Image (cartoon, rainbow, N blue to C red):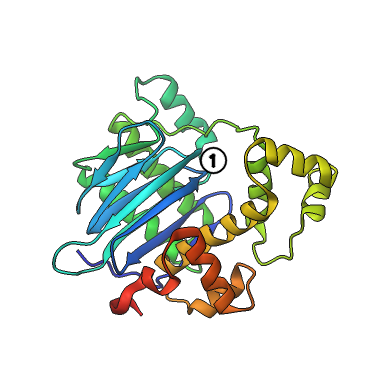
Amino acid sequence: MSIDTPDRDMHVRPGLGAAAHVMQGRELEILRIRVDQPMLIFIDKGTKTVRCGDSPSVQAFPGQAILLAGGHTVDFNNGVLEDGEPYEARCLVFDPALLEDAYYAGRIATTDAAAPGPAQLLRQPSPDLAAAFENARRALALTSAVPDAIVRQRLLEVMHWLLEAGIALHRPQVDPRISLKVRSLIVRRLDHNWTATSVAGQLALSEATLRRRLAEESTSFSELLVDARMATALTLLQATTHPVSEIALSVGYESSSRFAVRFRQRFGFSPTTVRGKRLC
């Protein structure tokens, strides 16, 4: 199924959520992607496999969906079918603020709906859930046409249909690791000229303390900076039609060639490989 989208781009409403229509030109293994917020993904073409730590892997085919709980680092494999059609999926991200809705919280308290694991397969999503999902996705995409109050209700409708299926969304547990605090700060302004000194100041730490605590978590400031930028760049390559040079600028690289080198180092393939010839 090919889905018409008014504008194939990332659509974000702070405090509500985000929507994306992802396309990928060839099969790729994508490792160590941080998923901070609950996300529902409907597969339209190809296959999607998700692995998280020691949990069993989950694979979805067209017409199926995967719910990611948020608060985990996962590996993805987005596969294309033998006919060569690109991988295609639609995604909704739920802002944690939605999970504090009083009526939704009250329903969770009075049902036996279970919290999903890191990745949960919806083998046969109900037509009602699928329709609510698409309505919410389109409401987010039509940023100038649908008021925030309506977008909120459409996202909540998806959450309530998940409850009807026995699945309750919960706010991801707070992770105290300093590396996640650094990453959260960086992703707010990926094109900013971040330094270890400026980030340490934002976190009320000395630079030496920041570097020591990151080393204790087996990472470094430079690794986190590159990883945050490359993860966002990957999403933009999959979910938008923006030129690679524009994506590079948006994540802090004036040089497209330097960006391409960093991207290949992180993922093992080039930015243009993500889209493939059919999507360029």
Taking depth in this image into account, of 223 and 275 the one nearest to the observer is: 223
**Image quarter (top left, top right, bottom left or bottom right) of the C terminus:** bottom left
Residue lying farthest to the left in this orientation = 83
From the top left corner, tell me how far across and down residue 199 is, in percent: 77, 51
User: Residue sitting at 51 percent across and 69 percent down?
Assistant: 144
What is the tally of numbered marks visible in this picture?
1
In the image, residue 13 sits, relative to residue 102, either above or below, namely below
User: Residue sitting at 21 percent across and 47 percent down?
Assistant: 127
From the top left corner, tell me how far across and down residue 207 is, in percent: 82, 47
Whether residue 156 sits left or right of residue 57 in the image: it is right
Q: Could you tell me the amino acid type at mark 1?
A: Pro
Taking depth in this image into account, of 263 and 241 the one nearest to the observer is: 263
From the top left corner, tell me how far across and down residue 223 is, in percent: 62, 53
Q: Secondary structure at mark 1?
A: helix
Q: Which residue is mark 1?
A: 96
In the image, residue 272 sits, relative to residue 151, either above or below, namely below
Whether residue 144 sits left or right of residue 4 in the image: it is right
